[in-house]
Image (spheres, helix red, strand yellow):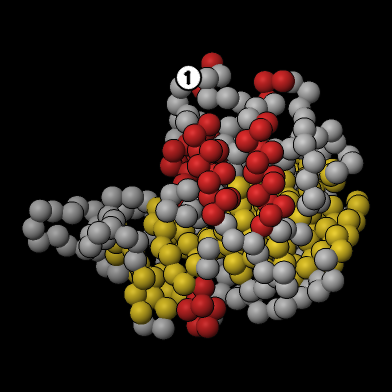
Amino acid sequence: MKNLKFAPNVFVVKDNYDIVIVCKCEGKCYITIDGKQYRENGSGIFKIHTPVHKITVPQSVLDEAGEYTVHFHPCSSKKDYWTKMDEAEKETFKFKALKKEEGINLYYTADIHSCYESAEKCCTYFGDDLDILVVNGDYGESNSREAIEELNNFIAKLTLGSIPVIIGRGNHDARGNMSELITDYISTDDGKTYYTYKIGPIEGIVLDCGEDKLDGCDEYGGVNYFEQYRRDELDFLKETAPFGKNKYRIAFCHIPFSYKFRDDIFNIDTELYHDWSKELDRIGIDCLICGHMHSYSLCPGEHEEKFEHKYPLIVASKKSGSILGGSAITLMKDKIICRFTDEDHNVTREITIDR
Ligand SMILES: [Fe+2]
């Protein structure tokens, strides 16, 4: 498809997929699955004046069909009357639905900070056996559309539009001149970057702390309202029903919010985060997987924390200069195995969580 910048990204959110399609020009975009059309909600109007389209489809429909077709009609000048579309294009993408009950392979990356080349090397660990890619925040810069689109290009290269992706936003993604646009390029629940998800036998939650300092910090110049956002997120957690006991239950959050940071400017909203943590214990999770620290750790035990929690917390990514490390996570009936892996796919440590 000549006007597609790269393959679509298929993000998991609730029991749907948000399919993100980035185009080289403005135009009308929709998806068909088994002949049925899926569109963005434009209150009856196709969105033309945007290079990025996000189309939600039910997981059950795409899983059953095993493929989806992207349609794009370039439109260089939408007129008041008699608009003419350019020649229509379409391309069909195969989709690998998660049908396994165990031996499920997730590759986890975070803190890429624009080092996409290193991240790509890490993320090819499972080869064709990859079932889900997880990208947990601090992707790159958010100061232009082009910079944001590097994330989607990275995901496209790894998944070819065929493998589901779970994505969380990091504090650095909330910074930058165009950071308000990042939600157009990733999955959200009605625009929010925190949400529950279900895929196959997995149930989980993606949380977002937003920035790592209080809203009044001079650096931000008053452009954020994350203190309210985090309070709203607590309400959302309180409304979330406990996950099924026979499910794999995995939570992701970029910032390990229970960690005590050396510099006090980062030790914010401690009581509120303690309440988040209590809710995660109530909902019941096998583990919380984080990034942000640029070095691996497992808690309780390997980092000073501000409060206790029942769930294991793994910071499953590292960064040293431009060299990254991620984690190859395999879900087995009785345990979750998390292997810390480097660019050359060497396993530097293996953690087992009994279920
Ligand atoms: Fe971070």
Q: Residue at x 36, y 82 (%)?
A: 35
The answer to which of 150 and 340 lies nearer the viewer is 340
- What SS does tag 1 mark? loop
* Residue 122 on image: x %, y %: 76, 53
Direction from residue 44 to residue 217 in the image, left or right: right
Which quadrant of the figure has residue 267?
A: top right
* Quadrant of image for the N terminus: bottom left
The answer to which of 131 and 213 lies nearer the viewer is 213
Whether the residue carrying mark 1 lies under 8 Å from ligand 1 is answered with no
* Residue 288 on image: x %, y %: 73, 51
Q: Residue at x 46, y 75 (%)?
A: 68
Q: Residue at x 42, y 58 (%)?
A: 54
**Is 199 rendered above or below residue 116?**
below
Residue 216 visible somewhere in the drawing: yes
**Is 164 rendered above or below residue 173?**
below
**Is 221 rendered above or below residue 86?**
above
Q: Residue furthest left?
A: 81
**Is 170 rendered above or below residue 262?**
below
Classify mark 1: residues with Cα within 10 Å, few (<14), some (14-19) or many (20+): few
Residue 155 visible somewhere in the drawing: no
Residue matched to label 1: 221
Q: Residue at x 66, y 33 (%)?
A: 271
Direction from residue 1 to residue 168 in the image, left or right: right
Q: Residue furthest top?
A: 218
Which quadrant of the figure has residue 125?
A: bottom right
- How many discs appear? 1
* Quadrant of image for the C terminus: bottom right
Direction from residue 33 to residue 258 in the image, left or right: right
* Residue 283 on image: x %, y %: 66, 57
Q: Mark 1 belongs to which amino acid?
A: Gly
* Residue 129 on image: x %, y %: 74, 72
Direction from residue 14 to residue 87 in the image, left or right: left
